[in-house]
Image: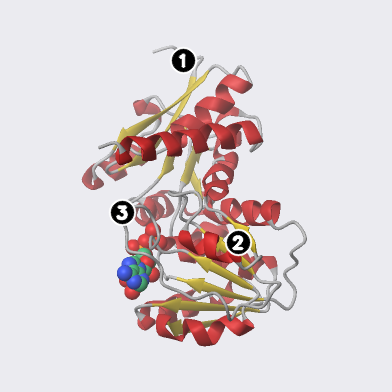
């Protein structure tokens, strides 16, 4: 293997549908970097060996996706506790892995950066102080979004989830991450929460192509509210379409995917890339192509 080429990849189980190779491939080409970014299916039982022996696999680092983010955190935190960022420790999940100058494995969670960078780009006039954010869902994606807003300095975050206990546990676990007051509510409370919500974010897979719809009437939201969805297939979910119809500001999910990739690329290839219109158009076209393929089946 040519040692002058730096190689990274995304790992998951399964991994076929990842768009990370398209994103990093675009940046490698744009900047003329002698690097490669692929994807590898790694079974859960092979994860530890893989992460702790990246050079043997010809890699300088990797992204980690479903279902490995929590297990990867445990493995790397055990092997090199100081190499895991405080944010990743607070979340108990990592998605970006690299080697430090002494070859020790390190990890971070860039989903938080990805969500917030995209949110601020799409809602540039929005400010955090005094705001109440309502989050739908209490899974891994919700953790990153709650952490992002809490660190940004909002006043209050309410996690509304079908299973109340999960939302309660998350509110307790993330309580120290910022100054924000974290609260939990059953999803059935959503209509009552909306009149006091400055931001509403869907972090569940509801509304994704092939999944059940997210049934919510947005009319109680105040006029200044921002509505965000982390689902990006379709690009404009029914939630975002409804918000748009009401004239509310919206933030779609694709930008989170693009922005979360930035810190990893910088670690592996030594240059901080930009999320450009061109990159977004490239990934959008791929999403539309996949959709057209499915509709034609
Ligand atoms: P991820 O890590 O990608 O966020 P996850 O951990 O599976 O995914 O979380 C999925 C979230 O979507 C959960 O909050 C889940 O609610 P429960 O905690 O009650 O399971 C929510 N969710 C999934 N399907 C749902 C449905 N049909 N109605 C309401 N919430 C749903």
Between residues 48 and 6, which one lies in front from this camera angle? 6
Between residues 136 and 176, which one lies in front from this camera angle? 136
Percent position of residue 240, x then y: 54, 60
Q: Quadrant of ligand 1?
A: bottom left
> In front of the other: label 3 or label 2?
2
- Residue sitting at 42 percent across and 71 percent down? 138
Residue 213 visible in the shown view: yes
How far separated are the C-alphas under marks 3 and 1?
A: 43 Å
> In front of the other: label 1 or label 2?
2
Identify the disc placed on residue 264.
none
Callout 1 touching callout 2 (CB < 8 Å): no
Q: Measured along the vertical axis of the image, is residue 129 above or below residue 62? A: below
Closer to the N terminus: mark 1 or mark 2? 1
Is 80 left, or right, of 149 in this rendering? left
Percent position of residue 270, x then y: 63, 29
Percent position of residue 285, x then y: 49, 34
Is 221 left, or right, of 24 in this rendering? right
Identify the disc placed on residue 244.
2
How far separated are the C-alphas under marks 3 and 2?
A: 22 Å
Query: What secondary structure is marked by label 2?
Result: helix
How far separated are the C-alphas under marks 1 and 2?
A: 50 Å
The residue wearing badge 1 is: 3
Closer to the N terminus: mark 3 or mark 2? 3
The residue wearing badge 3 is: 210
- Count residues near mark 3 (Cα–Cα under 10 Å), then give few for <14, some for 14-19, many for 20+: few
Closer to the N terminus: mark 3 or mark 1? 1
Query: What secondary structure is marked by label 3?
Result: loop
> In front of the other: label 3 or label 1?
3
Is 56 left, or right, of 185 in this rendering? left
- Residue sitting at 68 percent across and 79 percent down? 155
């Amino acid at each position: 293997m040519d040692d002058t080429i730096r190689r990274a990849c995304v790992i998951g189980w399964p991994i076929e549908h990842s768009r990370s190779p398209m994103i990093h491939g675009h940046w490698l080409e744009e900047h003329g970097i002698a690097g490669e970014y692929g994807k590898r299916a790694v079974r859960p039982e092979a994860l530890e060996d893989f992460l702790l022996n990246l050079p043997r696999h010809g890699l300088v680092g990797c992204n980690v996706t479903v279902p490995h983010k929590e297990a990867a955190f445990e493995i790397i935190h055990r092997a090199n506790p100081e190499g895991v960022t405080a944010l990743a420790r607070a979340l108990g999940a990592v998605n970006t892995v690299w080697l430090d100058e002494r070859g020790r494995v390190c990890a971070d969670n860039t989903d938080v950066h990805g969500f917030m960078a995209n949110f601020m780009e799409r809602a540039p006039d929005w400010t955090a102080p005094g705001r109440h954010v309502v989050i739908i869902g209490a899974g891994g994606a919700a953790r990153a979004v709650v952490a992002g807003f809490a660190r940004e300095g909002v006043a209050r975050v309410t996690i509304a989830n079908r299973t109340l206990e999960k939302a309660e546990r998350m509110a307790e676990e993330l309580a120290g991450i910022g100054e924000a007051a974290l609260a939990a509510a059953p999803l059935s409370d959503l209509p009552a929460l909306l009149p006091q919500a400055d931001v509403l974010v869907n972090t569940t897979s509801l509304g994704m192509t092939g999944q059940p719809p997210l049934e919510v009437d947005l009319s109680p939201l105040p006029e200044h509210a921002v509505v965000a969805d982390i689902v990006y297939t379709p690009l404009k979910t029914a939630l975002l379409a409804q918000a748009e119809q009401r004239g509310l500001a919206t933030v779609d999910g694709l930008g989170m995917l693009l922005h979360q990739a930035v810190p990893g690329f910088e670690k592996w290839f030594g240059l901080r890339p930009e999320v450009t219109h061109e990159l977004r158009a490239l990934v959008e076209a791929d999403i539309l192509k996949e959709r057209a393929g499915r509709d034609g089946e």
